[in-house]
Amino acid sequence: MVHHILLNFKVVFLVVGFNFSMATILVESNISAVESKYEFCKPKNCGNGPNISYPFYVYGNETDYCGHPGFRVHCLDHTPIYKTSAADYIIQDINYERQTFRLVDLQVFTNTTCPTLQQNYSLDRSSVDFVPYHADIFFFYNCDYSVSTNYTVSSVTCNASVINRTYVALVPRDEPFDWNRTACELVVAAPVELDQWEINQTITNIDYKKKLSDGFTLKWIGFGYNCADCQSSGGLCGFEEENSVCYCPDGTHTKHCKDGKFLLLLFYLSRVFFPCYSHTIQLTTPCYL
Ligand SMILES: *[C@@H]1O[C@H](CO)[C@@H](O)[C@H](O)[C@H]1NC(C)=O
Ligand SMILES: *[C@@H]1O[C@H](CO)[C@@H](O)[C@H](O)[C@H]1NC(C)=O
Ligand SMILES: *[C@@H]1O[C@H](CO)[C@@H](O)[C@H](O)[C@H]1NC(C)=O
Ligand SMILES: *[C@@H]1O[C@H](CO)[C@@H](O)[C@H](O)[C@H]1NC(C)=O
Ligand SMILES: *[C@@H]1O[C@H](CO)[C@@H](O)[C@H](O)[C@H]1NC(C)=O
Ligand SMILES: *[C@@H]1O[C@H](CO)[C@@H](O)[C@H](O)[C@H]1NC(C)=O
Ligand SMILES: *[C@@H]1O[C@H](CO)[C@@H](O)[C@H](O)[C@H]1NC(C)=O
Ligand SMILES: *[C@@H]1O[C@H](CO)[C@@H](O)[C@H](O)[C@H]1NC(C)=O
Ligand SMILES: *[C@@H]1O[C@H](CO)[C@@H](O)[C@H](O)[C@H]1NC(C)=O
């Protein structure tokens, strides 16, 4: 009888030990899978420009979970590029604390002495917006007579053809604006940023080429607020299936690296004390009791 109980105890001990080691292996294999997400999502740099981290992420190797949709960054010739449906922009700067980033149209750099943009911009996402004091530089190309608007226009001599002319105007954003639509072949608007004192200026008082190469600032809104919690706990923010997540050295958490520990402990304890009842958790683990 005593022998029997002792044998049983041995079996229980063995099974508990076995289950424990299986649980350890299970948890460890989970960790290596998410540890690679933690590794993959570490801040990156294209070579030039700012460090790229959440909500931005560098495109490549299916690491879309490292950032937010619409914040994909392409590294082109060691330069971070932000693509929209209308145009490609160089990311000059990202301020993660203020949640702003500054963009310059790639086309501006193709001809800095005579920047002539060919595409309107489009922000594509409702999660980004302009910061205050932004304006548009309007280009009026190939006009056969002076375009009539209630904003001052200036002639761009470097883009003029023998017959037709090109004009530019500075138009504060969100101001109603109309022009003689039959006068010109192509009209393109490019966002720029003004200093506060410049908001009532006209195109004749500002250096529009410099404004274009200085670029404009966008802010992102509506998400990323939990990211500080995640980061201060040693994690890296990510985005999976419409939810923000926190990648930590020990796995994926919902908000920060300290949450979810209780569940993990519960899981361990259930494996140790109720190896068979917790059987459904991991079907590949055999249950001998
Ligand atoms: C990028 O991050 C590295 C490491 O944290 C830091 O040394 C470097 O100054 C950062 N670069 C920029 C442009 O912020
Ligand atoms: C993609 O993976 C390859 C091979 O692992 C690596 O050399 C490359 O740097 C990765 N690219 C990015 C953008 O992470
Ligand atoms: C810039 O554009 C102007 C007008 O379109 C052209 O005359 C000039 O050659 C261009 N310069 C360069 C470096 O492409
Ligand atoms: C002026 O710029 C526009 C837009 O880039 C271009 O289509 C046009 O050919 C240019 N005209 C001249 C004369 O350079
Ligand atoms: C320009 O004209 C529009 C109407 O077409 C008007 O709403 C707007 O206030 C005018 N702007 C200026 C600066 O006169
Ligand atoms: C635009 O120019 C055409 C040709 O000169 C003229 O007939 C028309 O009235 C103008 N429209 C406006 C809104 O200025
Ligand atoms: C001048 O502009 C008019 C109106 O935009 C256009 O129809 C015409 O082809 C242009 N002429 C030249 C030589 O570009
Ligand atoms: C750019 O936007 C203006 C309206 O803001 C529009 O009239 C013009 O046709 C657009 N140009 C292009 C090239 O899409
Ligand atoms: C710009 O013009 C508006 C209306 O004319 C005026 O109320 C405002 O004070 C001006 N702002 C600056 C910075 O000059």
Image: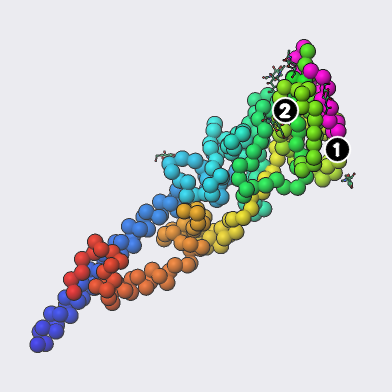
Mark 2 to mark 1: distance in Å? Answer: 21 Å
Residue farthest along the top direction in this orientation: 162
Q: Is residue 33 left or right of residue 44?
A: left
Could you say which is closer to the camera, residue 10 or residue 217? 217
User: Which tag, 2 or 1, sits closer to the chain's start?
Assistant: 2
149 in the magenta segment:
yes
94 falls in the magenta region = no
The residue singled out by tag 2 in the image is 187
Query: At numbered mark 1, what does the secondary structure look like: helix, strand or loop?
Result: loop
- Report helix, strand or loop for mark 2: strand
Q: Nearer the viewer, mark 2 or mark 1?
A: 2
> Residue 21: image x %, image y %?
26, 66
Write the start and end of the magenta stretch as one range: 144-162
Q: Residue furthest bottom?
A: 1
Ligand 8 closer than 8 Å to the CB at disc 2?
yes
Residue 93 found in image quarter? top right
Q: Position of residue 173 (x, y in %)?
A: 76, 41
Magenta part, dominant SS: loop
- Identified by mark 2, the residue type is Val
